[in-house]
Image (cartoon, rainbow, N blue to C red):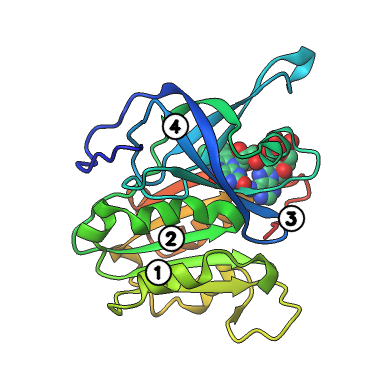
Amino acid sequence: MIFARLSGMEKTKPLPISAKLVDKKFLTHDVVELHFESTPAFHFEPGQFVSIVIPGAGPGGRDLRRAYSIASHPEKNVFELCVKLVDGGPGTTYLNALNIGDSFKGIAPYGDFIYKVRPGKSAIFVSTGTGIAPFRSMVFSKIYKENKPAFTKLVFGARDTTDLLYTEELHAQLQPDLLGQFVQVLSRPTSEWGGFNGRVTDWLRAHTTQIIWQETEFYLCGNGAMIDEVKQILSLHGVEKTSIHQEIYYKPKADGRIEE
Ligand SMILES: Cc1cc2nc3c(=O)[nH]c(=O)nc-3n(C[C@H](O)[C@H](O)[C@H](O)COP(=O)(O)OP(=O)(O)OC[C@H]3O[C@@H](n4cnc5c(N)ncnc54)[C@H](O)[C@@H]3O)c2cc1C
């Protein structure tokens, strides 16, 4: 059982947990969703992450730690992770090898990348790949539903239609009251695609006049190169640093290439 704390004011101290895998499914060819029950249960804010111990995978057989954002909302009685499998990566190989009933040891919850209540302001969530995980937690959480932004856009960037995540549920969650929109953008669609063609940064540049930049909170999650480029755009539009919230999953490649 995961207990929710709704004030959003004080954070829970991270504590050691043992998390048992209770469900697993592939969302795409290389992204797996894992559901865990934690002992003991822990409180978390939407947007926080768990730190997982990868036994003996480090230099000299030492343990490694890897961070994963919680993709489910705090009111659920299991917590869900959404993990992109990285070829030869110790963390993702370990998680993908877990069978139902297996457990990992970790520490949770961590992180300051949480949903901030900002009455009257809009919110734009920008993600690439599994960077969508904390945003799924946020927009399904009670604190978000009870303190909705004036308008929400969740912009998700991927390479191709085979990389899309949470399509139906996020459209259904965000659009019914017309105060939100789930925007999927594809950088290299190989099949017919009626949506936006380009990167998340192209989408922001293409919507300059529709965004009220200084009345919006920006949440950015995914690879560091994308986040740097988005922040350059925000700075051109005079967005205050206090309105920019970020979670970097990994740094850009040496050649500066952005991957979606
Ligand atoms: C706060 C935080 C939260 C995170 N949450 C998530 C999450 O919810 N889901 C998730 O899949 N990852 C997440 N990550 C990344 C995760 O911690 C690992 O870095 C990743 O799973 C790779 O670990 P590995 O040991 O398998 O491979 P490593 O050997 O550590 O990584 C190999 C390379 O893979 C690339 N890489 C790492 N992560 C990704 C990714 N997500 N997509 C594409 N390429 C990647 C990088 O170039 C990296 O150098 C998060 C990272 C941080 C710091």
State ligand 1's quadrant. Answer: top right
Q: Earlier in the sequence, mark 4 or mark 2?
A: 4
The answer to whether residue 105 is left or right of residue 17 is right
Label 3 or label 4, whichever lies nearer to me, is 4
Query: Mark 3 or mark 1: which is in front?
Result: 1
Would you say the residues marked 3 and 2 are in contact, meaning their CB atoms lie under 8 Å apart? Answer: no
- Residue that numbered label 4 is attached to: 38
Please rate how many residues cluster around mark 3, counting C-alpha atoms within 10 Å: few if below 14, some from 14 to 19, many from 20.
Answer: few
- Residue matched to label 3: 257
Distance, label 4 to label 2, CA atoms, is: 28 Å
Q: Is residue 202 visible?
A: yes
C-alpha separation, residue under disc 3 versus residue under disc 1: 26 Å
Residue carrying label 1: 153
Q: What whole-number distance in Å separates the C-alpha atoms at marks 1 and 2?
A: 6 Å
**SS class, disc 3:** loop
User: Where's residue 125, x and y in %?
Assistant: 43, 60
- Label 1 and label 4: CA atoms lie apart by 32 Å
Q: Nearer the viewer, mark 1 or mark 4?
A: 4
Residues at badges 3 and 4 in contact (C-beta under 8 Å)?
A: no
Q: Earlier in the sequence, mark 1 or mark 4?
A: 4
Q: Determine the residue positioned at 36% across, 30% down.
A: 41
Coordinates of residue 19 in the picture (x, y in percent)? 51, 31
Q: Residue at x 72, y 60 (%)?
A: 29
Mark 3 and mark 1 lie on one chain; the one further toward the N terminus is 1
Q: Which sits in the foreground, 77 or 216? A: 77
The quarter holding residue 63 reads: top right
Q: What is the x, y in percent for residue 219?
A: 42, 54
Mark 3 → mark 4, Cα distance in angstroms: 37 Å
Q: Report, in whole angstroms, how far the alpha carbon at label 3 lies from the one at label 2.
A: 22 Å
Numbered mark located on residue 125 in the image: 2
**Could you say whether the residue bearing mark 2 is in a helix, strand or loop?**
strand
